[in-house]
Amino acid sequence: DGGITQSPKYLFRKEGQNVTLSCEQNLNHDAMYWYRQDPGQGLRLIYYSQIVNDFQKGDIAEGYSVSREKKESFPLTVTSAQKNPTAFYLCASSMGGSSYNEQFFGPGTRLTVL
Amino acid sequence: DQQVKQNSPSLSVQEGRISILNCDYTNSMFDYFLWYKKYPAEGPTFLISISSIKDKNEDGRFTVFLNKSAKHLSLHIVPSQPGDSAVYFCAASRRGGGADGLTFGKGTHLIIQP
C-alpha cells in the first residue's frame, strides 16, 4: 500500500525543547512538503524539497529546519525559536517535475507545546 | 495578505441539492488550482483540479469552474450526500506545474443536512 506516514499522531513537548516530526513516503515521489494548520486557518507552507539534498523555505520557515537525505524521508524539526509551535503539521508529497500534479497528504501530527 | 480567499466559513445544504463552494484569488501568477476535502484531525484528500487553460473540469459529482478574468473558481457538488460534510480547501499553484508549494484558502465547512 503506497502512501505517506507521519508519526506520532499526537506529540507533547515542553517549551524550549526542539522536536522532530517524522514524514515517510513510499510513492516514489520526488517532491515533499511541510505545512502547518492552525484553527480556522488554511494550510501554510513551511518548507519544501524538490529533490534529495535540496530544500527551499516556504512562507513561514522561521523557527523550523528540515533535511532531505533520502528520497523517502523529509523530517521537520520545530526549534525553540518557533514562537507558536502548537499546531497541526501536515506532510505532503508529489511527483514533482514540470507537469501539473496534485500533492498527497499524510494523516498529520498534532504538536502541543506545554 | 491572503492570495487565496474563501469568503464563506460555512455552508449548509440539503441532501440531494447542489453545493456550490467559491474561491477567489489575487495572484495573477497562479495557473493551476485544486480542491481538497478534509475531515478533522486528518490530512486533506485531493478532489479535483483545473489548469488555467480550461474553464471547466468534471469528475463524477464534482465540477470545478474557472473564471480567469474574475480570478474566481467554484466547486459544484451534485447531488450533495451526507458523506460530503467536511471542510473544503481551495488551493493554487504559484507557477506553472512543478513542485512548488501550494497556497491555500482558509476553507469552507460544508454541512449536508438530511
Image (spheres, coloured by chain):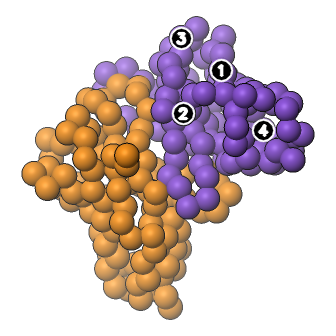
The residue wearing badge 1 is A66
Name the side, left or right, on which A5 lies relative to A51: right
> Mark 4: few, some, or many residues within 10 Å (few <14, many ≥20)?
some
Give, as a three-letter code, the residue at label 1.
Answer: Val
Q: Position of residue B16 (x, y in %)?
A: 38, 86
Is A27 situated above or below B57? above
Q: Position of residue A44 (x, y in %)?
A: 51, 42
- State how far apart marks 4 and 2 are (Cα): 22 Å
Question: Considering the numbered disc 1 on the image, is that residue within a helix, a strand or a loop?
Answer: strand
Name the side, left or right, on which B68 lies relative to A26: left
Q: Which mark is residue A60?
A: 2
Q: Chain of mark 1?
A: A
- State how far apart marks 3 and 4 are (Cα): 23 Å
Give, as a three-letter code, the residue at label 2.
Answer: Ile
Q: Are marks 3 and 1 in contact (CB under 8 Å)?
A: no
The residue wearing badge 4 is A7
Chain the render paints orange: B
Q: Which mark is residue A54?
A: 3
Give, as a three-letter code, the residue at label 3.
Answer: Asp
Is B91 situated above or below B107? above
Question: Considering the numbered disc 3 on the image, is that residue within a helix, a strand or a loop?
Answer: strand
Q: Which mark is residue A55?
A: none
Is B114 situated above or below B40? below
- Precedes in sequence: disc 4 or disc 2: 4
Question: Considering the numbered disc 4 on the image, is that residue within a helix, a strand or a loop?
Answer: strand
Chain the render paints purple: A
- Precedes in sequence: disc 4 or disc 1: 4
- Precedes in sequence: disc 2 or disc 3: 3
Give, as a three-letter code, the residue at label 4.
Answer: Ser
Q: Chain of mark 2?
A: A
Residue furthest to the top: A53
